Amino acid sequence: MMKIEVSALHVYPVKSLPGISLQSARLEPTGLAGDRQWMVVDDNGRFVSQRNTPAMALMGCELGDNQLVLHAPDHPPLALPLEPSTGQHAAISVWRDKWQALDAGDDAARWISGAIGQGRALRLVRADAARPRTQSQPDRYGPHTTTHFADGAPYLVAGADSLDRLNDSLSGQAGGAVDMRRFRPNIVVTGLPAFEEHATGRLQGPGYDLELRYPCQRCVITTIDPDTAIADPAREPFRTLATLNPMPGNPRAPAFGENAILVSGAGATIRVGDMLTALPRKT
C-alpha cells in the first residue's frame, strides 16, 4: 500500500496574492479556513489576478490578531479587520459566477489602487458569509458545493511527485526548475506517483474525506516568476506541462493538480504529516 502524506498546506487569503504556508488548518465546505476570502476587483466588479496584473506576485499578506495585513513594495502595510462590522455590498464576478460581496472601503481601495492599479481604480472586497457563492458547475462539483473566491472547487490538491516529474522534463532548459508556488495548491501530498492524483477518487485522512473531482487546467500564471513577477518568454513551464500532462479533451492546455471537495469532516483539522488513504476513481 502506498504511503501518502500531507507534506504542505497553503491558504491564499486574497485571491491571486502569494499564499501562507501552515502546519495545520481547519477544513470547511468552502475550503481551508481563511482561503480566498478577499479579492481585488476592477470598476466593473470583475476579479483582478496575476493574469492581467503580474505585480500581484510581489505583494504579501499575513493573518494575525483578527486582522489581515497586506504588504506591497514601496507602500506601508494595510491592516484590515477579518470580521468587518459594516460594509456596503458590491456586485462582483469570478468567471461566469456573479453575486454580492462586502466592499472593504475607500481607504483599502486607495491602497490597492496605488499598489497595483497602474492607473486603474481598483477595490478590495470580502466574501459575505450570509451570501454564499453557488457553484456554476454543479455537474462537476456537486449541486450543494459553495466557495468563496476560488476559480472552481473549494480545494486544490497537488502531488509533489508530479512537480518532480515536471522539473525532470524542464532540466537543461533556460528557465530551469520551478517550485510549487507556480501552481497555488491548498494541499500538497507526497507518495502518489506523478500525476496519479488524476486517477485518485478520494483521499481519506484522520476524520476527513476529500473527493478529487476534476483536473485543474493551468493558465499563464504558471509562467510568472513569483520572485520577480516577470513572465517566462518561452512560456515555461506551461508549454512543457501541456506536453507532459494535457487536460482531458484539450491537449493544448496543461493540467496540474486536482480540484476537490470535502465529502465529510467539516470542522476537522488537517495537518502536515497526516497519513492518507487513497481510493481509486470510479469509472
Image: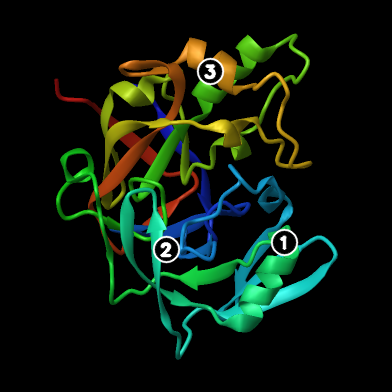
CB of mark 2 within 8 Å of CB of mark 1?
no
User: Looking at numbered disc 3 in the image, what kind of residue is underneath it?
Assistant: Leu
Give the class, few, some or many, for how many residues have Cα within 10 Å of label 1's Cα (few <14, many ≥20): few
- C-alpha span from label 3 to label 1: 34 Å
Disc 2 secondary structure class: loop
Q: Position of residue 36 (x, y in %)?
A: 47, 59
Q: Position of residue 13 (x, y in %)?
A: 53, 62
- C-alpha span from label 2 to label 1: 33 Å
Question: Which numbered disc, 3 or 1, marks the residue that appears first in the sequence?
Answer: 1
Disc 1 secondary structure class: loop
Does 280 appear above or below 273?
above
**Residue where numbered disc 2 is placed:** 33
- C-alpha span from label 3 to label 2: 30 Å
Q: Residue at x 45, y 59 (%)?
A: 25
**Residue where numbered disc 1 is placed:** 119
Q: Residue at x 75, y 20 (%)?
A: 175
**Residue where numbered disc 3 is placed:** 241
Q: Position of residue 56 (x, y in %)?
A: 67, 52
CB of mark 3 within 8 Å of CB of mark 1?
no
Give the class, few, some or many, for how many residues have Cα within 10 Å of label 2's Cα (few <14, many ≥20): some
Does 102 appear above or below 57?
below
Residue extending farthest to the bottom is 85
User: Looking at numbered disc 2 in the image, what kind of residue is underneath it?
Assistant: Ala
Which of label 3 and label 1 is nearer to you? 1
Disc 3 secondary structure class: helix
